Image: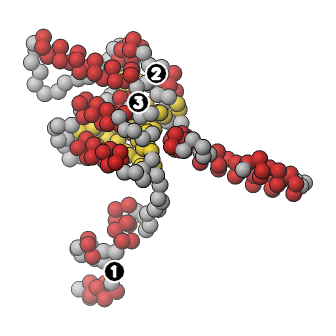
Amino acid sequence: MRRAKLLQQSGEPQENEPRRRRSKTAENIVELGSTEVPKAKSSIHTMVIIGQIEGHVVLPAQNKTTKYEHVIPQLVAIEENKEIEGLLVILNTVGGDVEAGLALAEMISSLSKPTVSLVLGGGHSIGGPVAVAASYSFIAPTATMTVHPIRMNGLVIGVPQTYEYLDKMQDRVVNFTVNHSHITEQKYRELMFRTGELARDIGTVLVGKDAVDVGLIDQVGGVDDALSKLMSMVKPETKSPAKVRKAHRKSEADVTEPGVSKAKHETSHQALS
């Protein structure tokens, strides 16, 4: 009781105190584990698609999901916002609802602004079409992408119409992926129906460079590469951040070298400008 009174007098937030009365620093510690969140005004908007892409059926609470009804309004706002010049899409998804994933992919591909996608961890199943929907795509060296046929869960009626519906939906995924990447339809279907690589299943796992070699992803890279590419697409006349940092490091190295004359240092700066 005495400790509670002392805490109340000192102004420190208590555990049972309403969250709205806590300081901003306390909120950051509880929610993000940091006393201060870095703020930067940028013309690049970052969108993260993680976990399972949730469609018309609500998934259990313990599943980490990306709800398509949350992402679609964001994409519309990005298109309308004049201050946003480019979109970076970061994916680490196991896939999910086919129609919801295709809806997100169509929205991303139809944006008038430059878009770059980066697959980190995984871009499996319907995450593949979302990744290739961007204007340019990257994949981390250790990231993977699983290409496999679509499936149905729940009650399945064993009639020819059911299989025709599956074929049509499969064609939608194949056609979108082929039209927005460099992979051929024959190669994509061959990877999709390959046997022996996945236990108790059919399909193919592509790791990093493998996805680039088959033409599914454009390039192997990370965050720096993705941002540099996006900046070059937004403002082609400006240097990319990576090149600016490398040039700055090189100029500092030239200054620290013994026996470097002032004239040489000035010449190097002129060459970099």
| SS for dot 1 | loop
The picture places residue 207, in percent across and down from the top left corner, at 47, 28
Q: Amino acid at mark 2?
A: His
Badge 2 vs badge 1, beta-carbon distance below 8 Å: no
Label 1 crowd bin: few (<14), some (14–19), many (20+), radius 10 Å: some
Q: Which quadrant of the view contains residue 104?
A: top left
Q: Amino acid at mark 1?
A: Glu
Query: Looking at the image, is mark 3 or mark 2 earlier in the sequence?
Result: 3
Decide which of tag 1 and tag 3 comes sooner along the chain.
Answer: 1
Circle 3 residue:
132
Compare residues 215 and 151 and report the one nearer the observer: 215
Q: Residue at x 83, y 54 (%)?
A: 265
What residue did someone put label 1 on?
12
Mark 2 Cα shell of 10 Å, populated few (<14), some (14-19), many (≥20): some
Q: Residue at 82% across / 54% down in the picture? A: 266
Q: What residue appears at the point 36 percent right and 14 percent down from the top-left corner?
A: 189
Mark 2 = which residue?
A: 182
Instruction: Identify the image quadrant of the N terminus.
Output: bottom left
Question: Marks 1 and 3: which is nearer the front?
Answer: 3
Q: Nearer the viewer, residue 194 or 68?
A: 68
Q: Residue 106 at what x, y percent from top left? A: 31, 32
Residue type (three-letter) at the residue carrying disc 3: Val
Mark positioned earlier in the residue sequence (2 or 1): 1
